[in-house]
Amino acid sequence: MASALESTDIKNKLEDLSGVVLKPGENPYNALIEAGDDDPAEIQALYAAHRVRRNAQQRDKFLTSDYTELIIDPYLLRLENPHIEPGFKDLRYCMTFWGRPPIHVLKLADAIQQKLKAIAPKIWLMPLYQMHITTLEIDFCRTAEEIESLKETLKPANPHIASYTYRHRSRLVKPMISYDLSAFALSFLPAAGEPPLSPAPMAPDNVEVLKQGDPYTYHHLRRDIWDLAKEAGVTISSRYIVPSAHITLGRYLTNEDHATPEQRRKWVDAIDEINRWLETEIWDNAGSDLIGEWVVGQEKGLDIRVGTLWYGGGRTVMMGEGF
């Protein structure tokens, strides 16, 4: 019965609004690095252009006079409300490499979730312990057997991939809420010279770090992980390749909080207000109790994950070493 449902991706395609054009047949992450002249400031600008344009696009969709309704995920709706379809199971198996947020990023995400919940009490919030950033999606919406085959193919490469962030450290900064008609997320930009804010790595941290500093951006990390997976012998079938580094904060399961133009205006205005707060009080602020920076791999390495991964589920095949 699950196969008859329509994924939100069909109604809500995530397009690249940075202006970068991918080149067929090569690592898709190379295109943006080349478009940005391998310069962290230019790469950050391309990520920023994507999220600013997308937020403006989505704001218009909430406020337009021909607005119809939110894009409610029918799978999550049934999982959260079993009475709708008793016995329903999500059979969309996937394989991904996740980054897991360190504690200080989870604290920031929690604070933002509570601000959003105060505006729209009916929203569904991603549990903190399930939060993740998708560094690379290997495949999605497959059978359990197909994903098991991918897992076995990658098995010899898993230890190196999972702990890759231990010696290849990229930094994310400038958190902001990104949103559309189906979900909302905390998005980051690759760092480009901002003052460091994260807690120091847990001592001792005397490993030889091969890549660190802002010239090695999160996009470089994604490029490298793509290459490692390809070298291991798998075909990578990601849903999209866009300049986005985000943690899903939540989704909509009802139109109740957004039924009227006034409610929708209140929602987008609240997001704008939170984003102003983030920019003025959290970005580059060493004195803030909340920290708006993430060095990917701090506390936990990459989480090689399989199963029904939507909404933070599934199981870990291997977790890499954190610093």
Image (tube, grey):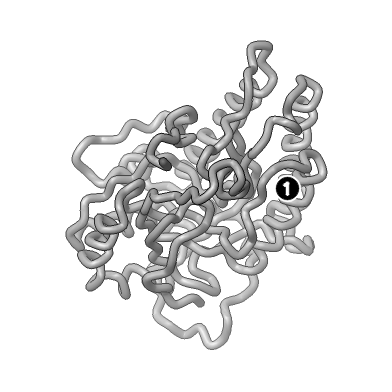
Give neighbour class at mark 1: few <14, some 14-19, many 20+ (Cα, 10 Å).
many
Q: Residue at x 58, y 47 (%)?
A: 187
Q: How many marks?
A: 1
Image coordinates for residue 8, horizontal then vertical, percent: 49, 35
Asked if residue 15 can be seen in this view, the reply is no
Image coordinates for residue 96, horizontal then vertical, percent: 38, 57
Q: Residue at x 30, y 35 (%)?
A: 22
Image coordinates for residue 26, horizontal then vertical, percent: 22, 43
Which of the 4 image quarters holds residue 321?
Answer: bottom left
95 vs 232, nearest the viewer: 95
Asked if residue 7 can be seen in this view, the reply is yes
234 on left or right of 47? left
In this figure, which residue is indicated by the disc labeled 1?
Answer: 278
Location of the N terminus by quadrant is: top left
Against 21, residue 313 (above or below) is below
Q: Amino acid at mark 1?
A: Leu
Which of the 4 image quarters holds residue 127?
Answer: bottom right
Against 234, residue 262 (above or below) is above
Q: Residue at x 53, y 71 (%)?
A: 298
Q: Residue at x 53, y 38 (%)?
A: 74
246 on left or right of 103? left
Residue that protrudes farthest toward the bottom in the picture? 204
50 vs 260, nearest the viewer: 260
Classify mark 1: helix, strand or loop: helix
